Amino acid sequence: MTMTGNILITGGASGLGRATAAAVAKDGGRPLVIDLGEPEAGVDHVRADLSDREQAERAVRELADRAGGLDGVVTAAGIDSCGRLEDVPADAWERVIRVNLMGTAAVVRAALPYLRRSGGTVVTVASTLGIKAVSDATAYCAAKFGVVGFTRALAAELAGDVGVTLLIPGGMRTGFFDDRDEQYKPGPDAQLNQPEDVAATILFALRQPRGCEVRELVVCASAETSWP
């Protein structure tokens, strides 16, 4: 299998993105992070708000040009705003869509010229809630269902040109749940995956030789309630 090379990672300062950046570095690749926060010391990064298309596109170009190209993109950034539709402020609801779905599309669009040159791979991060809807998650489900559809269409569009992998992860032990109301946090007995284990599957997809693609991956704890 090939080395990972220059890998752009959104949300690389925490959670799955941070674990992915660490995995890429350990594999001998160069992680390039876009996030509002600061990643691990020494990781090349640009701080940007992915809800702003111009910021997202500018950050992709800056990092890609700085590194001399891109071999892969992982769109791990994601946010949530739990609650019934009428109870979630419209701005908060729409921000989930902008970051999770529109931000994913903006980053991939900006990265395509670089990925076409390298024959690289895109790994989008959806969710088991992108294929199974639940109450009090209309924004998150809408965004992640969108990521699923976007990625499947992208794979058809870029076949033979740029690799495309859809990752559908279940819950992970990250800070993703920290700011939620208690009723929306996993219970003490919840089975969640470690982000490092999920990151290993991303690395597997990125390391496939040109012409061989992992189209879709579902990675979840064995007792994941949102799968199947």
Image (tube, rainbow, N blue to C red):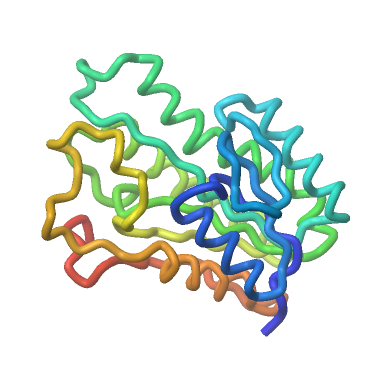
Residue located at (83% from left, 54% from top):
67
Residue located at (63% from left, 67% from top):
24
Give the percent coordinates (x, y) of residue 153: 55, 51
112 vs 10, left or right, is: right
Q: Is residue 184 above or below residue 97?
A: below
60 vs 196, left or right, is: right
Q: Count the labels in the image.
A: 0
Residue 161 in sight in this render: no
Q: Give the quarter of the image for residue 192.
A: bottom left
114 vs 177, left or right, is: right
Residue located at (70% from left, 45% from top):
45
Looking at this view, name the residue that lies furthest to the front. Answer: 41
Q: Is residue 50 above or below residue 76?
A: above
Q: Is residue 167 above or below residue 86?
A: below
Residue located at (56% from left, 37% from top):
37
Give the percent coordinates (x, y) of residue 161: 74, 63
Give the percent coordinates (x, y) of residue 94: 42, 22
Residue 83 in sight in this render: yes
Give the percent coordinates (x, y) of residue 166: 49, 59
Q: Give the quarter of the image for residue 170.
A: bottom left
Toward the viewer: 3 or 142?
Answer: 3
Toward the viewer: 190 or 102?
Answer: 190
172 vs 10, left or right, is: left
Q: Give the quarter of the image for residue 21.
A: bottom right
Looking at this view, name the residue that lies furthest to the bottom. Answer: 1
The C terminus lies in quadrant: bottom left
The N terminus lies in quadrant: bottom right
